Image: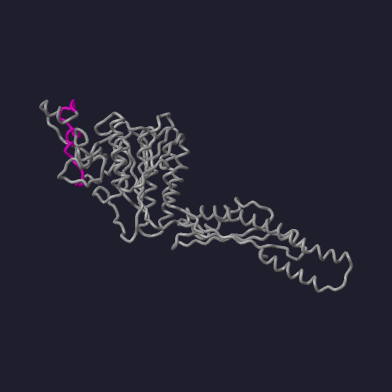
Amino acid sequence: MRVQELYSRLRRALRSFGLARRGNVAITFAFISLPLIGGVGVAVDYNRATLIKASMQSALDSVALTLAKNAGNLTAKELQKEGSQYFAALFRRTDTKKPKITVVSNAGTSTVQVNGATAMDTTILAVLGIKTVNINVTATAAWATQSYLRVALVLDNTGSMADAGKLPALQTAAKNMLSKLASADTATGAVYVSIIPFVKDVNLDPGNYNASWIDWSYWVESNGKCSDSHYSSKSSCVSNGNSWTPTAHSKWNGCVVDRGDAGGPNPGNYDANIVSPTSSIQATLYVPEQYSSCPQSSMGLSDNWSAMTSLINSMNASGTTNQALGLQLGWMSLNPTGVFNVPAKDTSHTYAEHIVLLTDGLNTQDRWYGAQASIDARQQILCDGIKAAGVTLWTIQVNTGGDPTSTLLQNCASDASKFFLLTSASEIISTFDNISFKITQLHLSN
């Protein structure tokens, strides 16, 4: 019985008392006592019902939020099973009849609705024949639908990531994030993700050796074979009267170094922006390098979730740290600049763009510098440009080795809440979950 019905039942009972014309003192006292008993009963049982409903609402809210994160990957039967199990773990009151919940998922509106029903046995009101109170609760979770999402994951694959379980934790965290982003992919083109593993170099896929954005002019100097095996560069080989046979471009392993002039970044700041590569400006082109610690190939924006998962599973740890190159190509991956195949945007939608940069170390080496301060200065220019372009930049420092807190990463983040300093590998997983939740803007809609 609903709480509001209790008063009606009580009023009808009291009106029937007024029909009696005869009786003794004991009976009269009983009549006088009934309103008191009823009033106390309503207050006591109503308060209990209110507490039960609040507890049930809190549990259903948690169930709805949890189910909505993976609703896109589960059948109706699986949602019902998971919802029932999770609710049973959260709602532990013993003063109700066995509650029942039903889960309804609506892919069209990106919502999951969870309905709960139970009944409470009354105590004092039972003397009036009101033996139960029915309690019904609903919670709905949904994704905000104002913006489509484009997310670049810029992930440290350097040698130190092999320590303290960091790389396996990153792989788990990144795959969890992909799962959550996939759940938010409720319409064609709604969510795209790029993945940029970085070390000192970034791998732009050896299959691109004929791409127009590559400058092969530096390749010939160090990639080839001298007729005298004592010499390993073209200059020394030829200057000593020998012949030099360059290595075919098709043998390239895919790695590139920072853009810019050979002697350092030129005034165009091409290492710190996303100006389209053009053969008319050599410094805008990417320079191939046969780096022995070349990471896994990068992937431009995609909604091929299984392919992205495979890429993450294949990551390994090797090489030194150049955050700036990974970050620059992460930004490049969000824009149709000729390096990555970037899907066109639908003008009927707005877009939210994010870059998530994770690293476990400070900068150690780029194309020109071996000093952290010099590399950091270039990266700060890059970070300022990313934020000015309206891209949200999340930065994560995994500091298990006692390094100083990175001022650079703090300054690069879009705001203080988007910088994370972690001291253990396990925190990578919870941090990625936190960021995923915020990026997808999951919220309770009721």
Q: Which residue is at 52% across, 60% downward?
A: 113
Q: Report the number of numbered marks.
A: 0
Task: Find residue 338 and report its horizontal and vertical position in percent.
Answer: 23, 49
Q: Which residue is at 23% across, 46% downward?
A: 275
Which segment did they paint magenta? 211-231
Query: Is residue 390 inside the magenta stretch?
Result: no
Q: Answer yes or no: is residue 253 visible.
A: no
In front: 72, or 97? 97
Query: Is residue 214 inside the magenta stretch?
Result: yes
**Horizontal side, residue 402 vs residue 260: left or right:** right
Q: For the view shown, which residue lies furthest in the left direction? A: 241
Q: Answer yes or no: is residue 20 visible.
A: yes
Q: For the view shown, which residue lies furthest in the right direction? A: 24
Task: Find residue 286 and report its horizontal and vertical position in percent.
Answer: 22, 41
Q: Which residue is at 29% across, 43% downward?
A: 385
- Asked if residue 50 is positioned above or below residue 410 in the image, the reply reads below
Quadrant for residue 222, please give it.
top left
Q: Which residue is at 50% across, 56% downward?
A: 444
**Horizontal side, residue 330 vs residue 262: left or right:** right
In front: 240, or 221? 221
In front: 269, or 276? 269
Q: Please state, as top left, top right, bottom left or bottom right, where the N terminus lies in the image.
A: bottom right
